[in-house]
Image (cartoon, rainbow, N blue to C red):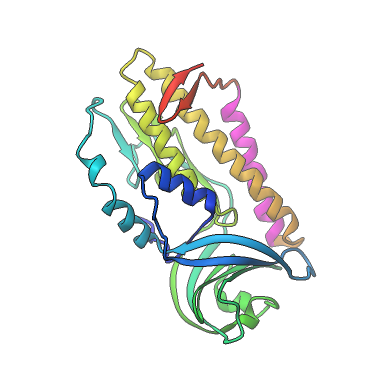
């Protein structure tokens, strides 16, 4: 079953630049809503801290539509690199087993913001049993992400974010917010990529850019696989993606180690530590014998 598409993505200049370069879409999301400030209250009894920020807000549907409209040229020049299956959604091959590191759900909700709320800001706040993230999408319109429990429960304990919300107009979706990865990530004639390969905690905001990098590597592996090094190339793909997933877990660990000291935070942190150890075991003895040169893999 496909996951629900996200009603809002927050794309940093780095992520936006990567997408524009890959798809040749220099004007992508040029007229989108902009976030210029981030207000953070993270950790027990933390005071809000205002930081400069730069990001564009766009829905996943709008982003995909923009990319498809600008992809007509590449659609006309496809090379045949043999019979490969790229799994970007479920179902996966029977050999691919998902490993999850956490149990936290996430809920998205459309909210109406108060008149006094900053239309160019986003807010993040940790609580005793989860955390909240609020994005201003337009004048007096926002998207709330509630991780751990439903919005009503966390908003009743919120000091920073609750004061900016007039009311919750509707719940949009529920999805797992804990990191997940399948293993193996590839096999003879197939690769898993994007959300079919792994899913990130939204706290780091790097899922979109990471999915693009995965796709670049997957395409490069398929192009290079006409050589006699298919096994080595697949091993490289598996190791690179696993290493990227481990880096994500390590970033998450910093947030979950500082967000709170209650049972909820300790349980999710222990799950992340378990995931980091799992990646260590998978990467034991791994060797990276290739590197990307543009969109192609070269042996090093």
Res 262 quadrant in image? bottom right
Nearest the eye: 104 or 29: 29
On screen, residue 56 above or below 238: below
Relative placement, left or right, of 5 versus 263 is left
On screen, residue 154 above or below 270: below
Membership of 273 in magenta stretch: yes
On screen, residue 281 above or below 98: above
Residue bounds of the magenta highlight: 264-284
On screen, residue 96 above or below 27: above
Res 250 quadrant in image? top right
Nearest the eye: 185 or 79: 79
Residue that extends furthest to the top in the rendered view of this protein: 228
Q: Which residue lies at the image location 44% right of the left edge and 18% below the top edge?
A: 232
Relative placement, left or right, of 80 versus 182 is left
Res 156 quadrant in image? bottom right
Q: Which residue lies at the image location 56% right of the left edge and 22% below the top edge?
A: 286
The answer to whether residue 179 is visible is: yes
Q: Which residue lies at the image location 78% right of the left edge and 70% below the top edge?
A: 47
Q: Which residue lies at the image location 36% right of the left edge and 45% below the top edge?
A: 24
Residue that extends furthest to the left in the rendered view of this protein: 76
Whole-percent x, y for residue 227 in the image: 34, 15
The answer to whether residue 130 is visible is: no
Membership of 294 in magenta stretch: no
Whole-percent x, y for residue 245 in the image: 55, 40
**Magenta stretch, main secondary structure class:** helix
Whole-percent x, y for residue 124 in the image: 64, 67
């Amino acid at each position: 079953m496909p996951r629900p598409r996200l009603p809002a993505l927050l794309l940093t200049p780095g992520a936006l630049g990567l997408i524009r370069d890959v798809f040749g879409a220099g004007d992508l999301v040029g007229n989108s809503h902009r976030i210029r400030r981030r207000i953070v209250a993270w950790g027990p009894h933390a005071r809000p801290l205002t930081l400069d920020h730069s990001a564009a807000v766009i829905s996943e549907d709008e982003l995909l539509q923009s990319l498809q409209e600008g992809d007509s040229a590449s659609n006309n020049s496809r090379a045949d690199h043999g019979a490969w299956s790229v799994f970007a959604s479920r179902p996966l091959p029977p050999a691919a087993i998902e490993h999850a590191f956490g149990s936290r759900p996430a809920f998205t909700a459309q909210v109406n913001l108060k008149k006094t709320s900053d239309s160019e800001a986003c807010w993040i706040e940790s609580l005793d049993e989860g955390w909240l993230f609020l994005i201003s999408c337009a004048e007096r319109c926002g998207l709330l992400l509630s991780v751990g429990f439903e919005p009503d429960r966390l908003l009743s304990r919120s000091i920073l974010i609750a004061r900016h919300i007039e009311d919750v107009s509707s719940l949009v979706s529920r999805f797992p917010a804990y990191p997940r990865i399948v293993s193996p990530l590839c096999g003879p004639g197939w690769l898993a990529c994007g959300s079919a390969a792994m899913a990130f905690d939204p706290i780091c905001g790097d899922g979109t850019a990471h999915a693009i990098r995965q796709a670049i590597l997957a395409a490069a592996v398929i192009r290079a696989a006409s050589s006699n090094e298919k096994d080595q190339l697949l091993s490289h793909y598996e190791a690179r993606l696993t290493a990227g997933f481990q880096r994500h877990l390590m970033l998450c660990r910093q947030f979950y180690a500082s967000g709170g000291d209650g049972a909820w935070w300790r349980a999710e942190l222990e799950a992340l530590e378990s995931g980091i150890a799992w990646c260590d075991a998978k990467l034991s003895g791994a060797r990276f014998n290739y590197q990307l040169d543009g969109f192609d893999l070269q042996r090093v």
